[in-house]
Image: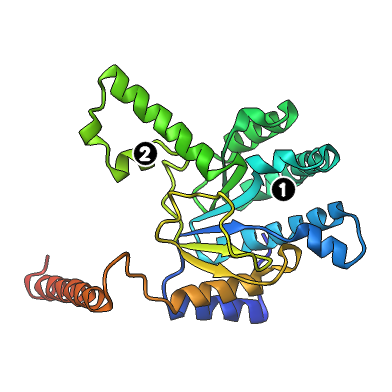
Amino acid sequence: MTRATGQDKKLQEQLMKRGHIPQHIAMIMDGNGRWAKKRALPRVAGHHEGVNSVRDIVEACGQIGVKFLTLYTFSTENWKRPQDEVSILMRLLLSSLRDECDNLHKNNVRLKTIGDFSALPADVQDEFLDAIELTKNNTGLTLVLALSYSGRWDLKNAMKKIAEQVQTGTLEPEMITDDIISQNLATKSIPDPDLLVRTSGELRISNFLLWQLAYSEMYVTDILWPDFRRKQLYDAIEAFQNRERRFGLVSEQIESTSKKSSNKNYVRRLLKSVSGF
């Protein structure tokens, strides 16, 4: 991982001092094809440059303390693209993983995937299984690649699992809660995203993490993915830090809860100082 130096390190320090760094950032990496078209290049050139953006964003997230980064790498709808482009994307995915796996492991990054893994080519599956096994005990950033994934696919699978549990008698219908649904999704071991970033200016979530994004803050930029690097990531995080996350409450409730929490912490510290425990 590239060590943050100079101006970049200052920007990182400013972000960390300003406020809360999102625990989980999800990204829709859009615009590779348009980036290439603007330069009269084949679409594959945009995908290749997009890999460089992934590398930079993964490094920056690890450096500033983001715990989870989920990248919408290949959707179930992407299988409908021209076969030549799909084959190129699979080969690029395979070569990129081979090139980056050791570096991810060296920098304490844990790799996970979500999606219909069985739909991927056998050699891609094998490479990912090896990388996941190699990095499974790492404790830094968790990099989640959504491969052959869609939010509807995820919810459909969760419904099937829950229906099976009801059918076998291990779950009563009235016991189905938000937590039960979350526990049956592909992301069951991952907290919901705090921040969703979408590049290329499109105002839609494209069937991505439909349940999990319910209360995520959204940040949309016109910048195409191959041009999106750590500086643009910092802009997105700064915008996130300037927002008030209410989760359905009103501002006054948030302020009241914050004050109560602050007062409890103050009393706790005071008791500790006078009692010695």
Residue drawn at the location 8% of the way across and 75% of the way down? 274
Q: Where is residue 91 in the image (x, y as percent from the top left)?
A: 80, 39
Under tag 2, what secondary structure? helix
> Can the viewer see residue 49?
no
> Can the viewer see residue 44?
yes
Give the Cα separation between the discs numbered 2 and 1.
Answer: 31 Å
Residue 39 in which image quadrant: bottom right
In the figure, 80 relative to 209: above or below?
Answer: above
Residue drawn at the location 69% of the way across and 45% of the way down? 102
Q: How is the image coloured?
A: rainbow
Residue drawn at the location 69% of the way across and 32% of the way down? 120
Which residue position holds label 2? 183
Residue 181 in which image quadrant: top left
Under tag 1, what secondary structure? helix
Q: In this view, does 25 lie to the left or right of 269?
A: right
Pick the residue in front: 16 or 272: 16
Q: Which residue lies furthest to the left in this view?
A: 275
Pick the residue in front: 257 or 33: 33
Q: Where is residue 24 in the image (x, y as percent from the top left)?
A: 48, 58
Which residue position holds label 1? 100
Q: Position of residue 35 (x, y in %)?
A: 81, 64
Q: Which residue lies furthest to the top in this view?
A: 168
Residue drawn at the location 55% of the way across and 50% of the way down? 208
Does label 2 or label 1 sit earlier along the sequence? 1
Task: Name which residue type carries label 2.
Answer: Gln
